[in-house]
Image (cartoon, grey):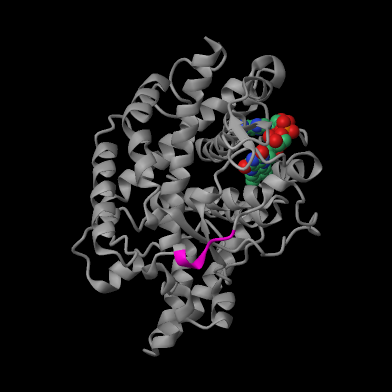
Amino acid sequence: CFCKLKGSIDDCSCSIDTVDHFNNMKIYPRLQSLLIRPYFRFYRVNLKKECPFWVDDGTCAIRYCHVQPCHDDDIPSGLKGEIPQLLHVNEDSIDKYRPDTQVINCEQTAKDHDKELGYLNTTISSENYKEFERWQLYDDAQDNFCVEETNIGEYVDLLLNPERFTGYKGASAHRIWRSIYLENCFRPDNSPNNFIQSSQINGMCLEKRAFYRAISGLHASINIHLSAKYLVSIKNSMSFHNGVEWGPNLEEFHSRFSPEATGGEGPGWLKNLYFLYLLELRALNKATPYLEREEYYTGNDENDSETRVAVKNILEVIKSFPEHFDESVMFNGGSQAQLLKEEFRQHFRNISRIMDCVGCEKCKLWGKLQIQGLGTALKILFSGKFDQWTPTLNNFNRKHFYLERSEIVALINGFGRLSESIFELEKFREMMR
Ligand code: FAD
């Protein structure tokens, strides 16, 4: 079977079998019970932001694209009073110190930052606290791989809106994927303006390969989900949820991943899912000391305490994984490597903006969540801030290492999507057998 993948995961030393066993036996069941807890169930997101790149295709009329609104009574009391960090500072200052989110060339980026930092260095000595806060905001923005939201949006109940087949396809969906792969992923020099073939990837450096594999892994995960939770039938029967039954569609899965249907590329895309899984797993492992001390506050003491125990338990299991992804081999090599890292970050920030152009609300919800989750993982791995994090750091430093609640929710839910994809893949393998 083409989906019985063999060998080790590209750019990692770990084998597919090791990940399958670890995920399906240990991680997946734990995440399933963690993600229904109130802290992780409600995600705050702005789904109304305008697409910054082209005129919107208009709101999708497909019934299954609709995101069900959250009932105010369902939102835990502790989350209603949530004040995001950015609200402490006035909006003008945020825009002033936020780096340009356009993709620009690396030298330009380095020069601009020097200029701004020079200005900030002179003003910080004035001991003006507001200036200090601005400086800190600027500094935080340098670590972020996603564009920060100025309008924080509304709570969505993720359990009410599961990721599954919506029917979103055609020109609108293709424009998003084309824009991501052709304009915002790294490409081999002089390559034709087409989707990259797996044979071309090895000609690129590790960092650029990793970027491509992560995006391709996310794309594979989305397409596995829509094949595993496909619209199987519509009936007027009480046994169907709202008259609709969702289930696996082997033909759909085959048409998206078999070598015959994809010019031989499909199995490589599936392997990229494993690469992304290992990358996010390592980020969780690296952020363990931080995540273990998080309050997971929702206003219900008993529930919050159970959540802390469940998180601690899953982090212990993650710690026991034998072959974590090694991020320390990336972005080494002086100023060139730093420029590459900046370019990497700018490309990713652009992808986070493209998510506002997705023409199906439900796809946008999960697209934004998963991109924010991956952006948080990249921040943990590459900002350097989590390299030295220990629970004993004083308040100043702890503020520096701050993860917003939405980042934590996106990180764990995003990882949950990948974990479920690997689990669903095993079910497809069984069906093919
Ligand atoms: P697409 O999946 O649109 O792919 C376009 C091209 O990309 C392919 O022709 C192929 O050359 C290449 N490609 C495909 N897979 C990979 C890969 N893994 N790696 C590298 N290259 C690849 N639909 C739903 O039903 N439910 C959802 O929740 C959903 N969420 C979405 C979220 C986002 C952000 C986007 C952009 C789309 C989403 N979609 C969703 C739509 C879905 O992903 C497909 O775009 C749609 O089903 C059309 O599929 P397709 O066969 O034309 O190829």
Secondary structure that dominates the magenta span: loop
In the rendered image, residue 202, in percent from the top left (x then y), is placed at 57, 27
Q: Residue at x 66, y 17 (%)?
A: 264
Nearer to me, 130 or 37? 37
The reply to whether the magenta stretch includes residue 72 is: yes
Q: Is residue 199 above or below residue 421?
A: above
Q: Residue at x 65, y 16 (%)?
A: 259
Horizontal relation, residue 337 to residue 260: left or right: left
Horizontal relation, residue 324 to residue 44: left or right: left
Instruction: Tell how many labels.
Output: 0
**Residue 190 shows in this picture:** no
Residue with the most extreme left position = 392
In the rendered image, residue 118, in percent from the top left (x then y), is placed at 49, 77
Q: Which residues are magenta?
A: 69-73
Q: Residue at x 29, y 64 (%)?
A: 300
Q: Is residue 53 above or below residue 19?
A: below
Q: Which quadrant is home to the N terminus?
A: top right
Nearer to me, 408 or 278? 408
Q: Which quadrant of the figure shows ligand 1?
A: top right
The reply to whether the magenta stretch includes residue 145 is: no
Nearer to me, 135 or 95? 95
In the rendered image, residue 235, in percent from the top left (x then y), is placed at 68, 33
Nearer to me, 394 or 202? 394
**Residue 199 shows in this picture:** yes
In the rendered image, residue 133, in percent from the top left (x then y), is placed at 42, 80
